[in-house]
Image (cartoon, rainbow, N blue to C red):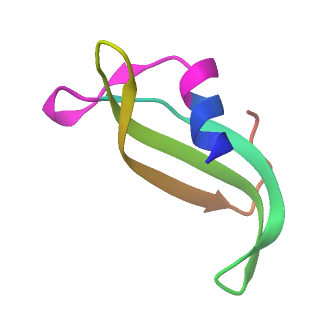
Amino acid sequence: MAEVEEAIRSCPWQPADLGRLECMKNFPFNGEWNRKIYATKRVRPIFVEEANEIVVVTVYTYYSEEELSP
């Protein structure tokens, strides 16, 4: 998912549970999800930085009716 990669590359990392890392980025969405229209989609990947790669453990996605800044 390109949004996950963009979030990891462009947003500050913060510590998460179990020694993992997280970051967050808002994206314009202006679309329908679960029969409702949302303006913004927030992507919050949880990941681990290994020696040669970043391993994404999970990704949380939140939708908002309001336009949120990136």
Residue 14: in magenta span: yes
For residue 54, what is the image quadrant? Answer: top left
Q: Which residues are magenta?
A: 8-20
The residue lying furthest to the left in this view is 18
Picture quarter with the C terminus? top right
The residue at the point 29 percent across, 12 percent down is 51
Name the side, left or right, on which 10 lies relative to 51: right
Give the number of marks.
0
Q: Residue 28 at what x, y percent from top left?
A: 81, 49
Would residue 48 appear left or right of 66 to someone viewing this image? left
Q: Residue at x 64, y 20 (%)?
A: 10
> From what the image shows, is residue 66 above or below residue 35?
above
The picture places residue 13, in percent across and down from the top left corner, at: 44, 19
Q: Residue furthest front?
A: 52
Q: Residue furthest top?
A: 51
> In this image, 54 relative to 27: left or right?
left
- Residue 5: image location, x then y, percent: 59, 34
Asked if residue 44 lies left or right of residue 7, the reply is: left
Instruction: Specify whether residue 53 is painted magenta.
Output: no
Q: Residue at x 66, y 42 (%)?
A: 3
Front position in the image: 1 or 27: 1
Considering depth in this image, is 47 or 61 the residue closer to the camera? 47
Q: Position of residue 19 (x, y in %)?
A: 17, 26
The part of the image, by quadrant, that contains residue 66 is bottom right
Furthest-right residue in this view: 30
